[in-house]
Image: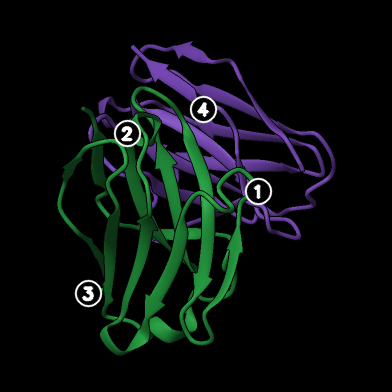
Chain colours: A green, B purple
C-alpha cells in the first residue's frame, strides 16, 4: 500500500526550532516529488514547496522561501520540513503530499497532516 | 504568479441535486488543473487532474471540464458523503503551485 506517514502533533513556544517528517512507503520514494502544504486554522490550502528526493531538487513558494527548510533523506524514504525560529503565526496543519507518477504538481496522495501549535 | 479564483464560496445543495463549482485562472493554465476534496478533519483527496480525468477510485458522478482559464467541477447527484470543501489547483509550468480559495458544499 502506498502511503505517507507524518510525524505527530507538536506544541512549541515562539522562538523554538522544529523539524517534522513525512515517511513514504509502497513506492519508489526517490523518483516522485513530495510537496508540503500549509492549512492555517479555518483557512485554505497554501503550497509551501516541493522536493525531489532523488537529487534533492527543491522548489520553494516565494511566500515561504527563507522561512522554512525542506529536505529529504532518501535512505530512510523521509521528507522533512523545519523551522529555526517558530512564530505564533506558524500555527497550522502541515500536510505532505506525493506528486503523481507523471506530473509532480498533481498531489496524488496526502499524508494525514501534522498539527503544529505555537503558543507562549 | 497565476491566481486561482473559485466561486461561489459556499454552495447550498440538497442531496440528489447537481452541484456546479467554478474555478478561474488569472492566465491560461491549459489543461493543467486539479480538483481536491477535503472533508472536516481529513486531509485533502485528489479528485480530478488534467482538468477532466478522474483519479483512481473517484466515482463517475464527479466530472471536470474546461481549459485555459475557466474550469468547472460538476457533481451530478450529491450524496451525503460529498458535502465538503473543494479546491482547484493549477500546475502549469510550476513552480509555484497555486490553490483556489475553496468552495464549501453544504446541505
> Where in the figure is residue A47, as x and y percent of width and height?
53, 47
- In-front residue for pair A25/A114: A114
Residue at disc 4, secondary structure: loop
Residue pointed to by mark 1? A62
The reply to whether label 3 and label 4 mark residues of one chain is no
The reply to whether label 1 and label 2 mark residues of one chain is yes
Residue at disc 2, secondary structure: loop
> Where in the figure is residue A113, as x and y percent of width and height?
27, 48
Residue pointed to by mark 2? A91
Residue pointed to by mark 4? B102
The reply to whether the C-beta atoms of the residues labelled 3 and 2 are less than 8 Å apart is no
Distance in Å between CA atoms under marks 1 and 3 = 34 Å
Q: Earlier in the sequence, mark 1 or mark 3?
A: 3
**Chain letter for the residue marked with disc 3 in the picture:** A
Mark sitting on residue B27: none
Residue at disc 1, secondary structure: loop
Distance in Å between CA atoms under marks 1 and 2 = 19 Å
Q: Residue at x 26, y 68 (%)?
A: A3
Residue pointed to by mark 3? A1
Question: Callout 3 environment at 10 Å: few (<14), some (14 to 19), or many (20+)?
Answer: few
Quadrant, the N terminus of chain B? top right
**Chain letter for the residue marked with disc 1 in the picture:** A
In the rendered image, the vertical position of residue A111 relative to residue A51, given as above or below: above
Q: Earlier in the sequence, mark 1 or mark 2?
A: 1
Pair 4/1: label in front: 1
> Where in the figure is residue A57, as x and y percent of width and height?
58, 77
In this picture, residue B89 sits left or right of residue A7: right
Amino acid at each position: 500500500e502506498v502511503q505517507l506517514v507524518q510525524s505527530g502533533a507538536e506544541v512549541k513556544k515562539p522562538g523554538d526550532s522544529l523539524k517534522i517528517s513525512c515517511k513514504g512507503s509502497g513506492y519508489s520514494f526517490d523518483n516522485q516529488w513530495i510537496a508540503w502544504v500549509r492549512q492555517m486554522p479555518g483557512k485554505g490550502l497554501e503550497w509551501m514547496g516541493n522536493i525531489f528526493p532523488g537529487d534533492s531538487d527543491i522548489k520553494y513558494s516565494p511566500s515561504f522561501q527563507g522561512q522554512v527548510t525542506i529536505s529529504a533523506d532518501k535512505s530512510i524514504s523521509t521528507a522533512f520540513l523545519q523551522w529555526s525560529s517558530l512564530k505564533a503565526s506558524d500555527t497550522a496543519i502541515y500536510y505532505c503530499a506525493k506528486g503523481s507518477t507523471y506530473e509532480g504538481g498533481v498531489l496524488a496522495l496526502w499524508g494525514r497532516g501534522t498539527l503544529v501549535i505555537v503558543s507562549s | 504568479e497565476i491566481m486561482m479564483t473559485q466561486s461561489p464560496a459556499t454552495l447550498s445543495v440538497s442531496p440528489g441535486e447537481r452541484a456546479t463549482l467554478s474555478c478561474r485562472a488569472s492566465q491560461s493554465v491549459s489543461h493543467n488543473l486539479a480538483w481536491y476534496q477535503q472533508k472536516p478533519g481529513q486531509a485533502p483527496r485528489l479528485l480530478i487532474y488534467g482538468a477532466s480525468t478522474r483519479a483512481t477510485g473517484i466515482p463517475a458522478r464527479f466530472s471536470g471540464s474546461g481549459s485555459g482559464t475557466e474550469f468547472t467541477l460538476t457533481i451530478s447527484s450529491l450524496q451525503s458523503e460529498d458535502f465538503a470543501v473543494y479546491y482547484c489547483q493549477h500546475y502549469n509550468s510550476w513552480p509555484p503551485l497555486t490553490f483556489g480559495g475553496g468552495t464549501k458544499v453544504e446541505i
